[in-house]
């Protein structure tokens, strides 16, 4: 069975995006050789990347014209976008799913293959979290306090208790945290 893994960078105060769409400058505060290496290493585990509409559109806009090893990965990896409003998903290796994301992801997890990752996509992540579908949370905490923006973890819903799998301090001042839901 495949695992579902969240990978995101957020600020100390819980924002994964600033006050305006795609305000991600705070990522630079955590970025460095160590985080780049970690990001590259985990690409070996990825069987598909799952996106909500807004994150998909931003990622497609950026990565479809970018160059380099990360761009090659992003353009070649299978992608699934969950949206009831998109007419088409034209980015290379993308499948559009208009149906229920929770049901589709639960089905995908039962298939053989490499793991499923969610990058960004706070609304999609929230719906998957509420149904207990994530097997692991990988969060890089950037040493920044934004005080406003889009929170990664939405309010409401049941609390979820986690078990720490790893914590790794970065020379940049960032911190990589890996958690699994408690059984």
Image (tube, helix red, strand yellow):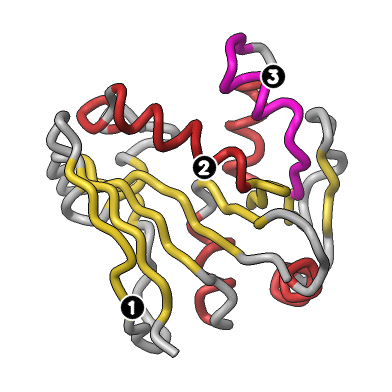
Residue 175 location in percent, x, y? 21, 46
Q: What residue sits right under mark 3 in the picture?
A: 64
For the point 83% across and 35% down, the residue is: 93
N-terminal of the two: label 1 or label 3?
Answer: 3
Give the label on residue 32, or none: none
- Is 72 included in the stretch rendered in magenta? yes
Q: What residue sits right under mark 1 in the picture?
A: 162
Image quarter of residue 145:
top left
Res. 178 visible in picture: yes
Q: How many marks?
A: 3
Q: Which quadrant holds the C terminus?
A: bottom left
Q: Residues within 10 Å of mark 1 (few under 14, many from 20)?
A: some
Image quarter of residue 174:
top left
> Is residue 135 left or right of 163 when viewed as pictured?
right
Residue 56 location in percent, x, y? 65, 40
For the point 62% across and 22% down, the residue is: 63
Extent of the magenta region: 66-80
Separation of marks 2 and 1 at Cα, in angstroms? 21 Å
Separation of marks 3 and 2 at Cα, in angstroms? 21 Å
In this rendering, the label closer to the viewer, 1 or 3: 1
Label 3: state its secondary structure: loop
For the point 58% across and 42% down, the residue is: 55
Q: What residue sits right under mark 2 in the picture?
A: 42
In this rendering, the label closer to the viewer, 3 or 2: 2
Pick the front one: 158 or 38? 38
Label pair 1/3, CB-CB below 8 angstroms? no
């Amino acid at each position: 069975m495949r695992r579902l893994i969240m990978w995101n960078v957020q600020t100390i105060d819980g924002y994964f995006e600033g006050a305006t769409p795609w305000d991600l400058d705070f990522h630079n505060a955590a970025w460095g050789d160590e985080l780049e290496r970690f990001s590259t290493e985990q690409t070996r585990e990825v069987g598909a990347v799952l996106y909500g509409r807004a994150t998909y559109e931003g990622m497609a806009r950026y990565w479809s014209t970018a160059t380099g090893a990360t761009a090659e990965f992003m353009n070649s990896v299978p992608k699934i976008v969950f949206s009831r409003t998109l007419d088409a998903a034209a980015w290379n290796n993308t499948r559009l799913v208009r149906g229920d994301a929770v049901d589709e992801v639960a089905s995908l997890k039962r298939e053989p293959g490499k793991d499923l990752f969610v990058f960004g996509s706070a609304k999609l992540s929230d719906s998957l979290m509420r149904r207990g579908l994530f097997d692991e949370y990988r969060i890089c905490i950037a040493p920044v306090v934004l005080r406003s923006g889009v929170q990664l973890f939405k309010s409401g819903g049941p609390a979820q208790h986690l078990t720490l799998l790893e914590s790794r301090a970065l020379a940049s001042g960032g911190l990589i945290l890996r958690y699994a839901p408690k059984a």
